Image: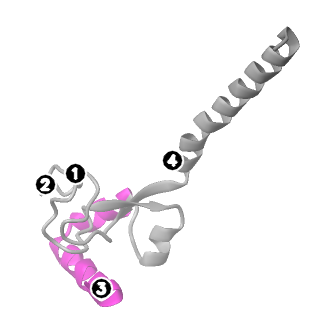
């Protein structure tokens, strides 16, 4: 292999690695936390309600303090909440119960 072929191959390899390195970042940007749609045992990480601290440990369905990671746009279609909306609902136990009942009827589990 001559010097020109070697440099061309090396440059192509570097370009390919750069494109592959950018892929996870693009994927991460298209995902977000969706509060209030997690079912028992299917939450992602600790919730803002403080009821648990690990992934997959929620015991309630549709608690506004629990989240799952969903593609951007999916959460709103499902009736899920942003973190700010979830915090507002969690501040009032009556609103929390009403939200959980609404999601139970909508998504059913």
Marking on residue 46: 1
CB atoms of marks 1 and 3 within 8 Å: no
Q: CA distance from mark 3 to mark 4?
A: 30 Å
**Label 1: how many Cα within 10 Å (few below 14, some 14–19, many 20+):** some
Task: Specify the quadrant of the image occupied by residue 59.
Answer: bottom left
**Residue 63 part of the magenta-drawn span:** no
CB atoms of marks 2 and 1 within 8 Å: yes
Q: CA distance from mark 1 to mark 4?
A: 19 Å
Q: Quadrant of the C terminus?
A: bottom left
* Residue at the (31%, 63%) spot, across then down: 86
Q: In the rendered structure, which disc, 1 or 3, sits on the residue that comes first in sequence?
A: 1
* Residue at the (49%, 55%) spot, across then down: 31
Residue assigned mark 4: 28
Q: CA distance from mark 3 to mark 2?
A: 23 Å
Where is 99 relative to 83, above or below?
A: below
The magenta stretch is 83-109
Task: Specify the quadrant of the image occupied by residue 60.
Answer: bottom left
Which mark lies nearer to you, 3 or 2? Answer: 2
**Label 4: how many Cα within 10 Å (few below 14, some 14–19, many 20+):** few
Q: CA distance from mark 4 to mark 2?
A: 25 Å
Q: In the rendered structure, which disc, 3 or 2, sits on the residue that comes first in sequence?
A: 2
Residue assigned mark 3: 102
Q: CA distance from mark 2 to mark 1?
A: 6 Å
CB atoms of marks 1 and 4 within 8 Å: no
Where residue 37 sits in the image (x, y, percent)? 32, 71
* Residue at the (59%, 34%) spot, across then down: 21
Q: Quadrant of the N terminus?
A: top right
């Amino acid at each position: 292999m001559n010097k020109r072929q070697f440099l061309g191959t090396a440059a192509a390899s570097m370009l390919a690695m750069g494109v592959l390195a950018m892929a996870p970042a693009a994927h991460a940007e298209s995902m977000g936390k969706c509060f209030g749609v997690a079912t028992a045992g299917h939450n992602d990480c600790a919730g803002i309600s403080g009821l648990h601290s690990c992934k997959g440990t929620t015991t309630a369905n549709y608690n506004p303090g629990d989240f799952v990671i969903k593609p951007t746009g999916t959460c709103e279609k499902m009736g899920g909440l942003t973190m700010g909306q979830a915090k507002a609902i969690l501040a009032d136990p009556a609103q929390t119960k009403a939200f959980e009942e609404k999601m139970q009827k909508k998504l059913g589990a």
